[in-house]
Amino acid sequence: MKEVDAELSTLDRAIINAFQGGFPVTTRPFEPAAAALRDRGVDVTGSELCERVRELDDAGTLSRFGALVNAEEIGGAASLVAMHAPADRFDEIVERLNEFTEVAHNYEREHPHLNVWFVVSVADHPDPDKDGSDRVEEVLAEIEDATGQETYNLPKQREFHVGAKFLVDGPVPEGDIDLSDLGPDVSPTDRSTLTPAERDLVVEIQGGLPITEAPYADIAARLGTDVEWVTETIKRFDAEGKVRRVGVIPNHYALGYTENGMTVWDVPEDALDEVGPAVAGLEFVTHCYERPRHEGVWEYNFFAMTHGRTEAESERRIAEVKALMDEYWDVGASDWDTLFSTRILKKTGIRIADRADSNTA
C-alpha cells in the first residue's frame, strides 16, 4: 500500500513541518515566520501565511494553532488507567466510565485482558494534606463502584520524551525552524502556583490563539491587559515548562497518520537509564515514559508510542524500537507487546480550567 500524508500544497507542507514548535512570540509573529520560510525557498508573505494557517485550521488539517499548555505544570494531576471490560458488558461499562467528567481520553485497545485505556485528569485535592494523585485514587474508587471492574493505575513515573510531531514530505523536512528566541527576554521563576491573571491567560489560550496577524494583542484585548505582558508571560511559561511549545498542532489523522501503536516493554531496572533516552531519541516516537507494573496482571514498565501512515509503516517503526532495545538487553518474545487502538471511546481533552483554579493563589 502506498504511504500518503494527505493532499497538501507545498505551502501547507512547509507550514506543518516548520511550525509545530518554535513559533515566534512577538507582536506580529507571522512576519518573521514568513521570512524564515522565504529563507527556505517558500515564497510567502506574513499575511498570506496567516490566512493559510487559518484555512488549514478551518479545514480540520490542524487541531489548533497556539500554545500547547502542559497541564501537569498548571495544577492537578493526570494518570493513564487500564481496565478490563467483558464483551457482554463492554458498552455498558464504557457508558458508565465516560459519564465521569474526570475521564478525558478513552480508547479501546487490542489486549487479551486490558482492553479499555483512559486518562483521568483531576484538579488538586481540596484537602491541603493531600495532592492530585490522592484525588486520582478517589476517582478510580468511584469508577470501580460504578462499573464493577477493577482499575489499574499507571501514573507516569518518569518522562523521557513528549513531542508528538507529525512531519510530511515537503519543505523543511526536519521541522527545524525555531524562532522561539524572538520576543521579550524573560527569566523563569520558581513559583509553583498561578496568579489570578496567569490563570485567566492559561484558560484563554488552552484552546488555541486567534489566527490573526496580531494574535497576542487580541488575547490581551480579551483579558483587558497589555500585549507586552501576554508575550512575556507566554515566553516565560515556555521557559518554565508550563507551555510545551508554541505553533501549529496538526490533526495527525488528517495527515494520514491513522495507525498508532502503544508499545510496552518489561525493561530490566538497571537498563532503564540508558534505554529511556535512546528510545526517546527516535524521531517517530511521540511519547516515552516509565510506568509502574501490576504484578500478575501487567508486567510492563516502559511505554513508547509510535504513529504510522500505514500498517506496514507502523510495523517497521515498532521493529526499529525493538532493534534498539536489543542493543541494551536481551529482549524475549514475552518481554514486550504492542497495543493498537481500535476505537476512540471518548476524547474531550484535559480540563485545564479546573486544574488551574485549584492551583491559583
Image (tube, rainbow, N blue to C red):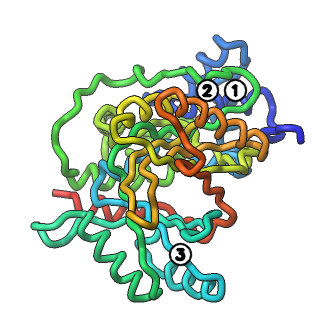
Left-right relation of 230 to 299: left
Assess disc 1: are there few (<14), some (14-19) or many (≥20) residues with their C-alpha within 10 Å of its C-alpha. many
Q: What residue is disc 3 on?
A: 84
Assess disc 3: are there few (<14), some (14-19) or many (≥20) residues with their C-alpha within 10 Å of its C-alpha. some
Query: CB under 8 Å between callouts 2 and 3?
Result: no
SS for tag 1?
A: helix
Q: Farthest residue toward the left?
A: 129
Task: Identify residue type, mark 1.
Answer: Ala
Measure the alpha-carbon separation of dots 2 and 1.
6 Å
Measure the alpha-carbon separation of dots 3 and 1.
43 Å
Question: Would residue 345 be visible to someone looking at this image?
Answer: yes
- Given residues 238 and 184, the one toward you in this image is 238
Residue 30, percent across and down?
A: 56, 28
The residue drawn where x is 62% and y is 22% is 174
Which corner quadrant of the image does residue 75 belong to? bottom left
Left-right relation of 131 to 33: left
Left-right relation of 359 to 334: left
Task: Identify residue type, mark 3.
Answer: His
Mark with earlier residue (3, 1): 1
SS for tag 3?
A: loop
- Given residues 256 and 67, the one toward you in this image is 256
Residue 247, percent across and down?
A: 53, 36
Q: What residue is disc 2 on?
A: 18
